[in-house]
Image: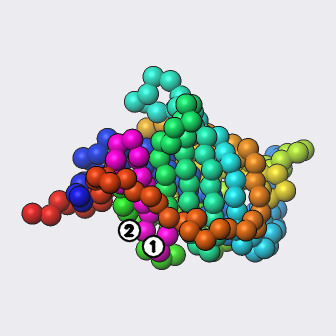
Amino acid sequence: MEERSTLGGSSLIPHSLFLIHYSLFFLLLLRISNASTPTELDSFLDAWAEKAKGVRSLSLRFRQEKKLRILRRPKISEGELLYAGEQLWVRMRGRTGDVESELLLKDGELRILYPRLKRLEVLDVGEGKSGKGFGVGTSIPFFAGDPREAKRDYEVTLERRKESDFLTLTPRAENARVKRLELELVDFEVRRYRQLEKNGDEMHFEVLSVEINPEVPEGSFELKVPRGTRIVRPGRRKRN
């Protein structure tokens, strides 16, 4: 069964946007004062882009903590991610180990499955598009050809630390929902990510383990949708 809803009509949309943001964030990994000078920042982004060229596939485990206004306490989850050939799969598990959600980005379409709710959200993202299609107020550099394109839509600052590097990205667009993104990198690999929303919501992300260029079994990029699952297309009007 398929239904179409507006963004304002689904209480799950805030959660969906968080899933979208962190998933797109991973693609940036692959395509790519202590306050730094523009030359230092450009050199850093050049080196990051050069290293990312050799990444054909990626497998990792991560921990996520979300602090939302609608929640009394932070929501902590662990996830696993697989990327290869412009395809992305993510599975999130709660404290008990039950699957909370599963995400698949493939063929210009983003699918988010909530097994317990028997709900599947489908968003058309298009081939090679940025985050503008998600209505987040500004394009997100996570679909950019390389990390240097982040400067197009964000004010980017770099802080070189003793054991890591710290990037801060502030959207240029005044209507952006995102207030600030913070990335901590070690040897051009993102280890921690923090996203702050203007409404006060936060997401913290930490990489637990990573494998570069693993063998990807056939059939890895598929969703097993339970019988009776409702299909919802956020942002589209219901058909008469």
Residue farthest left in this picture: 240
Secondary structure state at the residue bearing disc 2: strand
- Could you tell me the amino acid type at mark 2? Asp
Q: Is 152 above or below relative to 226?
A: below
- Considering the numbered disc 1 on the image, is that residue within a helix, a strand or a loop? loop
Magenta part, dominant SS: strand
Seen at 39% across and 56% down, the residue is 225
Residue 56 in view, yes or no: yes
Q: Is the Cβ of the residue at disc 2 closer than 8 Å to that at disc 1?
A: yes
**Residue 186 % position (x, y):** 82, 51
125 relative to 118, above or below: below
Q: Is residue 235 visible?
A: no
Q: Residue furthest front?
A: 227
What residue would you read off at disc 1?
Answer: 108
Residue 108 place in picture, x, y as percent: 45, 73
Q: Residue at x 20, y 60 (%)?
A: 237
Q: Quadrant of the N terminus?
A: bottom left
Q: Residue furthest top?
A: 72
Q: Mark 2 highlights which residue?
A: 124
Residue 126 versus residue 62: which sits nearer the camera?
62
Look at the image and give the residue range highlighted in magenta.
106-120
So how many labels did they put on this image? 2
Q: Residue at x 71, y 46 (%)?
A: 207
**Residue drawn 52% across the image and 53% down it:** 21
Residue 77 is left or right of residue 62, and the answer is left
